[in-house]
Amino acid sequence: MVETTRRYVLAKRPEGKPDRDTFELEETGVSDPRHGEVLVRTLYLSVDPYMRGRMRDRESYAEPWDVGDPMQGGVVGEVVESEHERWSEGDRVVGNLYWSEYAVVDGDDLSRVDARAENVTLSSYLGVLGMPGRTAYFGTLEVAEPDPGETVVVSGAAGAVGSTVGQIAKLAGARVVGFAGSDEKVEFLEDDLGFDAGINYKTTDDYRAALDDAAPDGVDAYFDNVGGPITDAVFTRLNVDARVAICGQIALYNEEGVPTGPRKLPQLIATRAKVEGLLVRDFSPRFREATEQLHEWVANGDVEYRESVVEGFENAPDAFLGLFEGENIGKQVVKVAEPSE
């Protein structure tokens, strides 16, 4: 019987960049599952940039946490005990659960994990087969809408979402350029994922000139995970009828005030470009479609992925903080426990 578990709670609201003091590790009791509930043991835990917004004391597209609330995120786990007709002991599941080693949850809030196919792992259900992959799928095909021969630019291209966006755009026949934060990441984009060009934004002084070299015919679609100066530069290179998908703004997440950069909206008049915000939950009725297609692409090698894995539940805050330092390539996950045989 599991009587207690460790979990992380929000210890305080960060001012600027979060640090270790933002999180508190506590021990709490574990109740027995009631009718319709299951007890889940965490195997892998996801950390994602959007969680920074939930630490603020204001409404956003994701409800903010109160100080003292348990942290939440994507979890791949294993059923330990079940009072739900759909789940049995040993089943592998995925859901949005607490940052905890064990949790009692509503069985209806879980989905099954099947890692038997080629190239598919349990943790991939937190990345390419989970929320980031679905974001890339719908954001690319429904918002950016690349056509064969067009040029697609992706910021944050070596992350969980961006790396998948670029590959889906390539499958659609587009030319793909990605911004990333190191030579290693640029090499990953070009050599492993098949991007046509990568730009190391940390060693590039002039983003516009870099775009002129990497995208000489201009930009037809832009998938933005970053915001800031990169987006300012891309806006000046948009073609007529370009599409812009605004998925994330990680360059601004730790700013206490919103910095005012160059005013780029006049660029949209001449280009008649469409700029659209992207929330993957709007596509929830079609999640199964996305997961099945991504599963097929991953299994047959059309879409590749990489994960940055931090070992140990106690290191979950460090994995989250590393997102803002650009430490991860691909999806950042925390390995909490080994699955049972």
Image (cartoon, grey):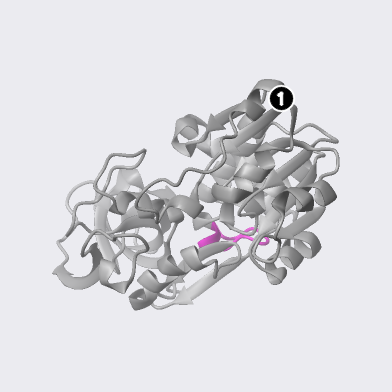
The quadrant in which residue 71 appears is: bottom left
Residue at 42%, 52% in the rendered image: 253
Residue at 66%, 46% in the rendered image: 165
Foreground: 108 or 265?
A: 265
Q: Secondary structure at mark 1?
A: helix
Magenta region, main secondary structure: loop
The vertical placement of 270 against 112, above or below, is: above
The quadrant in which residue 181 appears is: bottom right
Residue 231 on image: x %, y %: 61, 44
Q: Is residue 115 visible?
A: yes
Residue at 60%, 60% in the rendered image: 116
Q: Quadrant of the N terminus?
A: bottom left
Residue 261 on image: x %, y %: 53, 43
Residue 25 on image: x %, y %: 23, 73
Mark 1 residue type: Thr
Range drawn in magenta: 114-124
- Label 1 belongs to which residue? 271
Residue 131 on image: x %, y %: 49, 48
Q: Is residue 87 visible?
A: no
Does the magenta run of residues contain 139?
no
Residue at 80%, 64% in the rendered image: 191
Q: How many marks?
A: 1
Foreground: 150 or 272?
A: 272
